Amino acid sequence: MIEGAPWRRWVFFYVPVTAFVVSLLFPFYWMVITTIRPDSELYRPWSAANYAPFWTTRPTLEHIRDLLSETLFSTWMLNTMIISLAATAISLFCGLLAGYALSRLKFPYAGLIGTAIFITYLVPQTLLFIPLADIIRNFKLGDSPWALILTYPTFLIPFCTWLLMGYFKSIPKELEECARIDGAPRWKAMVYIIFPVAIPGILSAGIFAFTLSWNEFIYALVFLSSPEQKTVPVGVTSELVRGDVFYWGELMAGALLGSIPVAFVYSFFVEYYVSGITGSVKG
Amino acid sequence: MATGGSVATVALRQQYVPAAKRGPITRLLEDERRLAFCLMLPTMVLLALFIAYPFVNGILLAVTDTRVGVPGHFVGMDNFTKIWSDDIFHVAVWNTCLYTFVTTVFKLALGLWLALLLNRNFRGKAFMRAFILLPFIIPTVLSTFAWKWMFDPTFSVLNWLLFHVGIIRTRINWLGDPTMAMVSVIIVNVWRGVPFYAISLLAGLQTISPELHEAAAIDGARAWSRFRHVTWPLLLPVTLVIVLFSVIQTFADFQLVYVLTGGGPANATQLFATYAYQLGIGTGLLSQGAAISLAIFPILLLVVIVQLIYIRRTETL
């Protein structure tokens, strides 16, 4: 509980908390209000007398309709969904196996490989995008979803492996040994005994991987070129801005709709997401 | 967990046949090393193809004069000497360092403050924690567009707000003025990063036993000295890890600046990554772009080494 005199509670708790919440969430409110505001109100200078920023009396769905009918937005959504799901599935599969091997098995160079994976965990995408673009071209993967499905795991696998290693380490060895004594082969003990226990960790890693793929920008920007192949962030950036003209209503509608899948997944698994964050920094 | 395990083992026992009758693949995988090799294979192949190979390729690109569609010749360190004497590169280095330093200080300070506020019991805490993370969850490009709209010189709601509160008398040209452009980019980065700091630090705070605080309070320590001598030392390990992660991400930041200013006006917000993109992809000077993005590597390496030393030290403790 919050202790102290009422004025102390206000000064040290309610006022700062409210300030944080308002400033962290205001841009999202602004997205919503811009989306439903008619253009005639939208393009009214802030110094005009009738500038009423925080509400509108004539809400409209015009911008959402334009976005869905006159741009390829729904195609971008579908692309992003397919790419994110596929990249997440590949990363979870690889991360699960590698995490198990690194935390449970003894094999030569295990420490070295673990360190190498940790280092790739820290390699930002902006370090490699130029040579990678060259390689994607050579592999004839340019301008296809495969370019992203195969490259996103490079920053997702290290994260998944690292998170799941921590999870596997917390599962007692006896659990597996029981099964082994009863005659279960190694791989069956792994799949049927250890993996089910690690499901919360798998969920955390999966949700994290999904939101990271949805958020990725530079690879999608560089590897894809035709409008119908683009993902939401790249499509919105390149197709809703023509030269110097920004279609703000449509842009904000796109930002809003493009955020919904991520927000939706997140809202169902907040606790797993938070444990993913804390697991990733625990090291 | 223990009962679940034994039930599962019973199930397995009924399913299993004696070791001699197992298939050849199962017998092969009984060897720990072979199993480990098979488990590591998919990861190693993907990371070798799309991290190790591009890294080597990047170094090879950086020592040639390749352009888009024009195979290059070996030119040695020419690209590096060229960027070393390039004024825009100097600006980008300075901007990147400034951007990383200022945002990290603010994110840490505000994130810690928010974490301390949230580390109490009050109604709606779980709800609030979920909402506070939104800036970190929502795709950066999309939320940055909302900010760009809020910074618009003619239609800026921020200007309206500041004007009516009485802080400004004339409009602020958020993204058009070189200094203000840097300030704007920093504000958005801090806005996006604070939730991550706050939630991670909150997790760290929750591992600190309240008894320590009670003991210090009984000994007469006031709120500030309890924070200074109890909370902070215990929070330091997790703080260092968070900061190192965040520094790497911020140092290599691209999308936020790309959307907000594109590196302008007049390179005032040009960072490593945006400059590499501009030269490598925009102008098609692949090898110079590769040389610039490779220049991030030494700094990254330094940070990783510090982190590894740190982790080794805490493991031996």
Image (cartoon, rainbow, N blue to C red):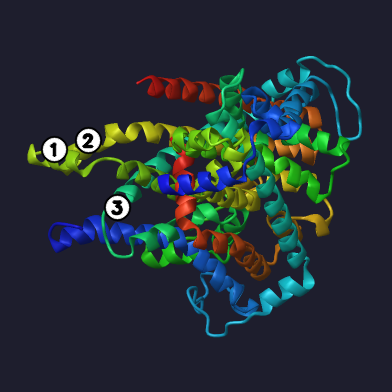
* Pointer 2 with pointer 3, Cβ within 8 A: no
Q: Position of residue A41 (x, y in %)?
A: 59, 78
The chain identifier of the residue carrying mark 2 reads: B
Q: For the C terminus of chain B, which image quadrant?
A: top left
With respect to residue B194, does A255 lie above or below?
A: below
- Residue at point 64% right, 35% down? B18
With respect to residue B232, does A8 lie above or below?
A: below
Please give left or right for residue A2 compared with residue B113 in the image. Answer: left
Count residues near mark 1 (Cα–Cα under 10 Å), then give few for <14, some for 14-19, many for 20+. some
Residue underneath mark 3: B117
Q: Position of residue A196 (x, y in %)?
A: 54, 48
Q: Position of residue B313 (x, y in %)?
A: 40, 20
- Residue at point 57% right, 44% down? B12
The residue lying toward the viewer, choosing from B275 and B314, is B314
In the image, are marks 2 and 3 on the same chain? yes
Q: Cα distance, mark 2 to mark 3?
A: 17 Å
Q: Residue A141: give its label.
A: none
Q: Cα distance, mark 1 to mark 3?
A: 20 Å
Q: Is residue B41 visible?
A: yes
Residue underneath mark 1: B216
* Pointer 1 with pointer 2, Cβ within 8 A: yes
Please give left or right for residue B296 compared with residue B100 in the image. Answer: right
Residue underneath mark 2: B230
The chain identifier of the residue carrying mark 1 reads: B
Q: Earlier in the sequence, mark 1 or mark 2?
A: 1
Please give left or right for residue B133 compared with residue A224 in the image. Answer: left
Quarter of the image where one finds residue B26: top right
* Pointer 1 with pointer 3, Cβ within 8 A: no
Amino acid found under the numbered disc labelled 1: Ala
Q: Position of residue A217 (x, y in %)?
A: 67, 48
Please give left or right for residue B43 compared with residue B211 in the image. Answer: right
With respect to residue B276, does A43 lie above or below?
A: below
